[in-house]
Structures are given as C-alpha cells and as structure tokens.
Amino acid sequence: MIKKAITAVIGLLIIQFIVKFLLKLELFKHVYNHTPGPCRIVPGEGIGYEDMETLPNGLTLITSGLVMPGASSTVSEHRKKHNGKGRIYLFDFNQPDKGIEELKIVGDQFNHSDFGPHGISLWKDKDKVTVMVVNHGSAVDTIEKFLFIAKDKQLKHLHTYRDPTIHMVNDVAMDSENSFYFTNYAYYKSGLFHVLEAVIPLAYGNLMYYDGKAYHKQDEGLFTLNGLVLSHDQKYLYTGETIPQKFHTFTRQKNGTLSRYQEFNVKTAIDNPTLDKDGNVLFGTHPIIWQVMGHTDNPETPAPSQVIKLHMKDGAVTKMTEVFADDGHTLYGSSVASLYNDAMLVGTVLHKLMYCEVRWID
Ligand SMILES: *[C@@H]1O[C@H](CO)[C@@H](O)[C@H](O)[C@H]1NC(C)=O
Ligand SMILES: *[C@@H]1O[C@H](CO)[C@@H](O)[C@H](O)[C@H]1NC(C)=O
C-alpha cells in the first residue's frame, strides 16, 4: 500500500516536471508580426549583433561575432563560412543609410584572433567615451576596456580585466570609468552539468561589482542572468533572467552596493536591456524558447524576434508593451534594441541587424 502511494507520488512529480518543462519551451505559442514603422535589414555579414549601446549623439556601438562558450561546432563553422570574427561596429542614427562600419581596434596587448565579444557598456565623461566589452576568450572570459576615438573610427585598447569571478559573463554595465557591474550567466559551460544546471535548474548565476579595487558579489541564486543596465540617475540597476523570464530591479547605493527591489514576470525570454531617453527599458527578447534553442544550436534555423518596452516609474514597472514582433521569417533571435529619436535598431544573437523608422510607439 505504502509502496504504491510512494510510486504514485513519484510518478506525479515526474509528470509535473515534464509538463512544466514542456510548457517552459512554449511549444504552443504563436508570434504575430508587427513593426513600429517601415523596417529594413542593415547590410552586413549577418552572423549576429548581440548587444549595442547608443550615445546621446546617436553613435551606436554594436558587438558582433559571438560564439558562446560550449556552443555547437555548427555555430563556429557558420561564423567561419560568413567571414565572421569578433568585431565592434559603429552605426550612426543620423546617417542610417551609411549602415555599419567596423571600428579598428589598436593596442599591442590586444589579441584580435581571440576575441568573442558579447555584452557592451559605454561610459561618457564630457568628450571622453570609455567602452567595456565582455570577451569569451579561448581560455577564459575577460572584460576588455577601450577608449573610443570617434573621429578615427578607432577603439584604443586600455586594459584587460581578469579574475576568477569573471567566469561565464554575459554583460557589463559601467558606473564610472573604472568600476562596473557584470552578470555571470551560469557556472558550467558545457557537458552534462551544463544541461543539469538548465533542467533542474541549479541557479549558479550571479551579479558582481568591481569598485575599481576589488570584486564584490551583489546577488546570487540566479539562473541565466543576462544583460544589465543602470538607470539614467544610477539609482537603479535593471537586469533579467532569460529562462525564468524574470525582470529584476535593484536599488543602488552611492558606494555601488545593490539590493533587490522589484521582480516582474515578463512572460518572455529576456536578453539585453537599453534605456530610452525617458528612462524606460527596452529589451530584445525571445518569444518562443524551443525555437531560439534550435537557432543557437544551428544559426540557419529560424527563431522569432520581439522587442518589449517596460515603462518605468521610480524603478518599478508600470506597464509592458510590445514594440516589435517577427515570427522568424525576417529576423531570427532578437537580443537587443536601441531607440533614438524616431528610429530603432534591433540586433540578434546570430543573425541580422534591422533598422526601423518609428512612426508609432506606446
Ligand atoms: C592569440 O589567440 C590565438 C587564438 O586563441 C592563439 O592561438 C595565439 O597564440 C594568441 N596570440 C598571442 C600573441 O597570445
Ligand atoms: C555602502 O553603503 C551602505 C549604506 O549606505 C552600507 O550599508 C554598506 O556597508 C556600504 N558598502 C560598502 C562595501 O562600503
């Protein structure tokens, strides 16, 4: 009798686990198409423009050539086939027809053939723009620091940050020229434990702060912690967990210390955030998880795209609207979007870059 009851309970738990897992994959979800105005693809290699940030003058820096640690060999082969390598591109919202231009990286300490750029952050102090980029190097992850010299279309390499806490980094957000936050997406980069970490899930992701001298853990127990950005006034930090589909607000003290403030269920797999001029948060998102999983395994497999806007007041979400959606016929796997005046740029993990005129936005 007891044996039967235990068997039944275990059976139910397994069924519950499988059903939850299948629901999580969003097997039955459909994505409709809509844009905020006319959109077009920006010419380029089309192998990913994973993260971007726009300066107040409309110049936008974009990372390209991401190969996630533990990615399938198909991804590396695809990158090779399309003349892919780690690059930082420049796009000017004032001259959208010029398209993108590769920035030349200069500096003896920088190894061009070991550059796998992921998240990016810009820090502007008067006319000086400092840039930080997450790099998945062949040996370890690093955070690379550059000086952006706009007139020469150059990035001058300044420093490489290396530390055991810079482990499997997704994104970086500077709060001064020499200090920054970063997210560790997961702990295991590949193999059985990588799968277990995702399926159980083990939540070994964390949020770190480097104050210019030392690395401090700000939060942990997070799973697939992705892009992050600071509010314009630096009172809040916004980030999200992709698979749990949760948006997080942290409050930020003047000395950099963070505390959890709000958690908001966005019901879509969020990737990288940017801010609009009013301080609202724009996210590139993946509306159907099982399709983006297939896409990140083989970049030629389509996956839908979506841009959402979180309307913010005092660090809390007041409303969520969808700015853009594509069922995967035009743009695969959107990871970021940036708004400037009446235009928007949408980047992807492993696919193309899209430019949209914004005629209407809520
Ligand atoms: C640059 O990176 C490549 C690829 O990982 C490596 O083979 C090469 O030895 C590196 N060069 C230097 C100077 O470190
Ligand atoms: C930062 O400031 C807060 C209070 O404003 C304090 O509780 C905390 O200990 C400080 N943290 C560090 C690392 O100095």
Image (cartoon, rainbow, N blue to C red):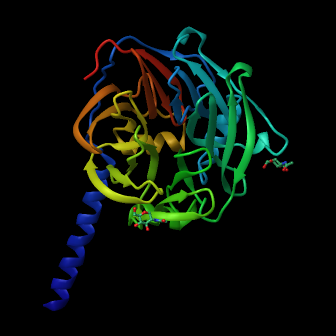
Q: Residue at x 24, y 77 (%)?
A: 10
Asked whether 18 or 62 is in front, the reply is 62
Q: Residue at x 52, y 67 (%)?
A: 193
Asked whether 348 or 290 is in front, the reply is 348
Residue 62, image quadrant: top right
Q: Is residue 294 visible?
A: yes
Percent across and percent down for residue 88 are: 65, 31
Q: Is residue 266 visible?
A: no
Percent across and percent down for residue 185 are: 49, 55
Asked whether 126 or 10 is in front, the reply is 126
Residue 331, image quadrant: top left
Q: Is residue 246 left or right of residue 131?
A: left
Percent across and percent down for residue 207 are: 47, 58
Q: Is residue 112 left or right of residue 72?
A: right
Residue placed furthest toward the left: 1
Residue placed furthest toward the bottom: 2
Total count of labels: 0
Residue placed furthest toward the right: 108
Q: Is residue 315 left or right of residue 277?
A: left
Q: Residue at x 25, y 23 (%)?
A: 362
